Each structure stands twice: as structure tokens, then as C-alpha cells.
Image: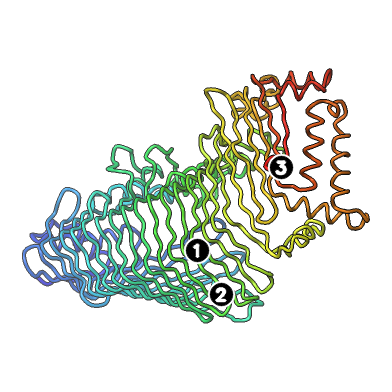
Amino acid sequence: MPRSLRHTPTAGALLVTLALASPATANPALDAADAFLQWAKDHGATIAEYGSVTETGTGDAIVRDAKFGWDLAFTVGGANIDLDIRINSPETRLIGVTKTDTGYHLDRYEQPGAHEFAFSGGVTEDGTRNAFDISVIQYDLVAEDYLQVPFVAQEDPQRPVSRFLPAIVAGLDTRLGSMSIRRMESTSKMPDGTSGTQSYEGMTITGLANGRIEEQRIEKTVSETTVKTEPGVTADTIAMREETGLQVVTGTDMKPLLRLFGALSADRLTGDEVIASASVEGMNFSFAEGSAAIGNLSMTGLRVDPNAPAVDIATIGDQAVLGTLPQDDASLAALGGQAADALGAASLDSFDLSALAVSSPVVNGAIGSIQAKDASYRGFGDFSMSDLSFKAEENNAAVDAKLFRMSELRLAPLSRYLDFFVASSNREPTLPEILSIVPTLGLLEMQDIKIASDELAAPVSIESYRLSMSDFINPIPTRIEAMTKNASFPVSLIEEDEARALFEELGLEVVSYSDESRISWNADTQTLNIDPLAFTIEGGGTMDLKMEIGGVPRVVFESPEQAQMVIATATVNKASLTVRDARLISAFIAQQAKPAGLSPETLALGLADQAVNELGPLKDTPFGQSLHGALKSFLVSPDELVITIEPETPVPAMQIMGVLATAPDTLPQLLNAAVTANSGR
């Protein structure tokens, strides 16, 4: 049954109205075509016409030469936007159509050949209109098992954005078994002067139901973009080409986002994943001055916290369009806090990028892999880069790293940062306010770091570095372990002349050092242990400090502003300091002796005498005498110096302060202090 419907601003409108007012036909495919035409008219279409609608079987029809258009105008944020939408579909095949309670179901839906979608208009600000133009051409669409739910949004000038929410929620009932598009092409020109073309090959969607898509796939994408540069830049435009291989996205679900934005009740959720997984095989970028490539890119588990407070984004959108957003600082800060918390609700289970390469006249290099786990705006569980190597043309600068890794980085909620900056704009922030935004870090690790340049006399390098922190109270770690192994840098980088001269005195061109530290607080015993705090300078000496302090209460970490109270409860349990092979001390003494016309040994003995004389009442105690002898031996030949404090029982800090004030000469005995030097000689 051939049929032709045409909507025009004059008599055609009456024909369409009469046709739709007539009883439903015996063919639901014809009814579906009529219904869409009426929907377009009801939603402001300025063009809505079919060249013909032909019945091809029970529940089947072909719509030819369909044309639709909307001419829109609206204001957003002070900018006036005009937008013309045009759709041109030469042929659409509706096959196996049935009417349901929620819409029309199609066994198969085909749009063979080229179908065009055009968006043109402009953005006018301060009397200047910048035009944009976007055209999309779709080739050979085929869909199966398609339930089309009508998109109905009632006109409401006071709700220009939120009026669409019921239609969006109703659209969750749309169902699609599969859809494929052989090819899609687009061209664009944006208001800022950017222009480009894109093509997509082999697009498919599988399994859409209840707002969730099982899989989306694009076999190949090619994009060419030209960006207009700012005045003063050498080139007027910058052009870039991108070629991307297979792209696959699984488990796309919009319900968690709709719940977060206040459009959907929580009982409609079927999970917290927005995207279950996504992968890209091969991305290649080329531009005038070089190229870049990514071997593979993948991610899993993009989620939205189902317990995060909902943000009424539609009402905010209404206010933005109507120009009724609040302008006072408190209200704007509150809106910013809501937006920040919404961003903080998103998280990513894992991210993996491999084989990144960059080539240009300025810099060349590669990164083997970049990985992240449990990532969000609140930090991440683990982040790493491996096999990094970059070289710059200028000064032959090069950076290499086998591994850079951070774990358990946790940030404060984004809204807390906004609160902090608002509060601190008018006054100095308090210590608790500062601590409220301090991040925590569980692990920082680096391996085989090397930085070289023609401007450096020797490379700067680190064989390995590891910092771990745990058992946090607020943002303060109560267990810290750090280790640097074989770090080195050229002596010429030392800015202080006398310090640099010490290493030169030893004949060193490169400073090589290692260090190790472990600091921990035991909540049960309230003891703070440093075991050890040690460092070694190759050819310069080593130092090893160990200490145990008791009576350190939890309040020191919970309320650092009250840390001074620890003096009332702290005790000195034990301590030791060991210095070995201190050739830097020999170099310092030799450096100072030469201009004074003294031998190094004479100056060393004089320094020992001077140090002991500074002890005051302690000078003539057994400890003072031992220290005098030890310093004379050590400063002449700095092989080893050991100072220990090992009281029989912990000594309260208040008692030490009292002894210093009344009987300082008894302090070494109280602490059971001892000193030895070069005991092995």
C-alpha cells in the first residue's frame, strides 16, 4: 500500500494531522513511521517529510527520502547559540514491526547507503558570532531486535534542561539485540577555528537492555585535525593525524551516572560499573614536527560509588540556562563542592598503557608501560611507569628510568580543598585545617634512574630508592622506612664552595651515597624507635644513629598542635651514634689547617680540646675525660667513634631537664653514657 506523507509549513501540516488522527492501520510499520513524523512535529521540527512510505509486507515498510530539521536558539552562560539540525535519510527499512505497551519493536531496521546528519550554527558573544559546522554521514546501518521507546519531553520554559529527565529515564527501556554501521564519516569546523575529519570503520553495538550495552566495537578510526594557533605563533595552524586500531568497550551502563545526577532512584541500579572494560589496539599520531604511538591501551572497572550523594545536575542546568545561578561566594562554593564530590565518586579499577613512543626534532623517547590500579580523584592504589627513556636535542639531555612507582596515594575529598582555599583566602589556616588536606602515600619506589647532559660533568643517578609509610593517624605516618642505594651526582653540582672543596680535597669528582632509615611508633608501648638513621658517602664516611624514646602518647599524632605536651611524659630509653671512616672530617681538618700554618694533627688535637672545654661542668667527669680522649684519637684518625646512652631504666625528659639545671655533671651517669674511638686499633 503505497503512501506518501509530507510535512510543510502550510497544507502539508493538515495532511499529517489528518493522517495521524485516523485509526491505526493494519500494518504497525506504517504506524511507526507516522508516529515518528508526529513526534518530530511535536518537538519543534521545522522540516518533517517523507518522500514515500511503502508497505512491503505484514509489519514491514520502506520509508524513502525522509528529511527532518530543527532550528533552535538558546542562551548558555551569556552566550547566544543558534543551531540548525538537518537529517537526510534516503531509505529506511522497517521489518517485523509490532506495537508494544512501551513503543514499537522491530525485528530488523535497515538504512542502506549514505544517511546524512548536519549540525550548523554559531556562538555569539559580545556581538561577535563564531560559526560552527558539523556533518556526519552514516553508511549501511543494520539493527536487529530493536525496541524503540518514544522520547517525549514536555515543553516547560522554566525547566529547559530538567524537562528531558523523564524521557531519558524512560529511554532505559529501549532494547537492541545488535546494530552495525559499515562506515561513518564526519567533518567539523568549530567556533575557535579548529577543523577536522573523522572516519570510523566497522562500528557495532551488541546487547542493549535496561540502559546497559554489552559491547561496542570500532574496527578502525582515522582522524585529521587542524587547530588554529594564537597570534604570534610561527605557523597559522597545526595539523595532526590519528590512526587507531580496534576499539572495544564492554559493559557500558548509564544508570550509575543517572543516579549520581539525581535522575534515577538507587533501586534501579544493577551495579556500580559505568564501563566494565575498554581497550584500544594501536594508536598512531603524526604531526608536522614528529610522531607518537601507543601500542595498546586498556582499562577496567570505571565505577560510580552508589553511596555518593546525588547532585541535582538538571536543576543546576536549568539555572545556568535561565541565568539564575547564585552569585554569592558561599553558594558558588557549595555548588563547587557538590561538583567536586561528584567527580570524587568515580573510580577506575585498572589502567594499562604499553609501548608509548615519541619522535620529534626536539625530543625522542619511549615508555614501556604506564599502569594504575584503584584510581580516582582521591588518589590510587598503585601507579607505575617502567622502561622510560627520553633524549632531548638541547645539550644532549637524557632521562632514563627502569621503574617509577607510587602506591596507596590518598587525597582528601575535592570539596575539602575548596573549603580550605575559601577559608584561607581571608586568614591564616590552622594546623588542623592544613592537615585535613595533606595527602598520604604508602610507597614511593624508583629503580635505575639516570639523568645525563652535556652541561653535567657526570650523570645524576640512583640505583634504587624506596620510601614506605604506613599506620597513619590522620595524615601522619607512624611507621616510615626509607632506603637509597648508590645515588650519585657530580661534585660540581654542590653550590657551597667550602663543601665542594671538601670532596675535591678527597680527589672525588662524583659524590656517591646510600642511606637507610626506619622510624616507628608502637601504640601499645608508646615508644618511638629510630633504628637506624644511617648514611654512607663512598670515600667520605658513614653515620649510624639509633634511638628509642618512650612515653610518646597518641595525641602527638592526633593533635600535633599539642605535641609540646609530650615533654611531660617522654623518656629516653636508649641511643647510640656510630661514625666510621670519616675521611670528610680529615679533609675538613686538612683544609682548615693549611691556611693556619698548622699540621692536620695539631689542628685535630686543638679542636678536641676546644670541644671538651665547651662541656662546662661535664669536662672533668669520667665521661668528659673519655670524650676528650676519644675525640683526640678520632679527629687525628677518624676510623670509628661510638657514643652510647643505655640507662638501666628509661629516664624521663623532665628529670633530664631538672638535672641540667641543678647538677649537670651527673647527667652522663644518669644516662649511662659512654664514648669510645678507634677501638679496633
Q: Residue 533, labelled with which disc? A: none
Q: Amino acid at mark 3?
A: Asn
Q: Nearer the viewer, mark 1 or mark 2?
A: 2
Q: Amino acid at mark 2?
A: Val
Where disc 3 sits, the SS reads loop
- Residue 35 in percent (x, y) is at 22, 59
Q: Residue 363, labelled with which disc? A: 2
Which residue corresponds to the image point at 63% horizontal and 63% vertical from the top-left? 460
User: Residue 496 appears in which quarter of the rendering?
Assistant: bottom right
Q: Nearer the viewer, mark 2 or mark 3?
A: 3
Q: Residue 81, labelled with which disc? A: 1
Which residue corresponds to the image point at 62% horizontal and 29% vertical from the top-left? 548
Q: What's the CA distance linking mark 3 and mark 1? A: 85 Å
Where disc 2 sits, the SS reads strand
Which residue corresponds to the image point at 64% horizontal and 20% vertical from the top-left? 648
Classify 10 Å Cα crowding around label 2: few (below 14), some (14-19), many (20 and above).
some
Left or right of residue 600: residue 515 = left
First in sequence, mark 2 or 3: give its number: 2
Which residue occupies the extreme right position in the image?
Answer: 597
Q: Amino acid at mark 1?
A: Ile
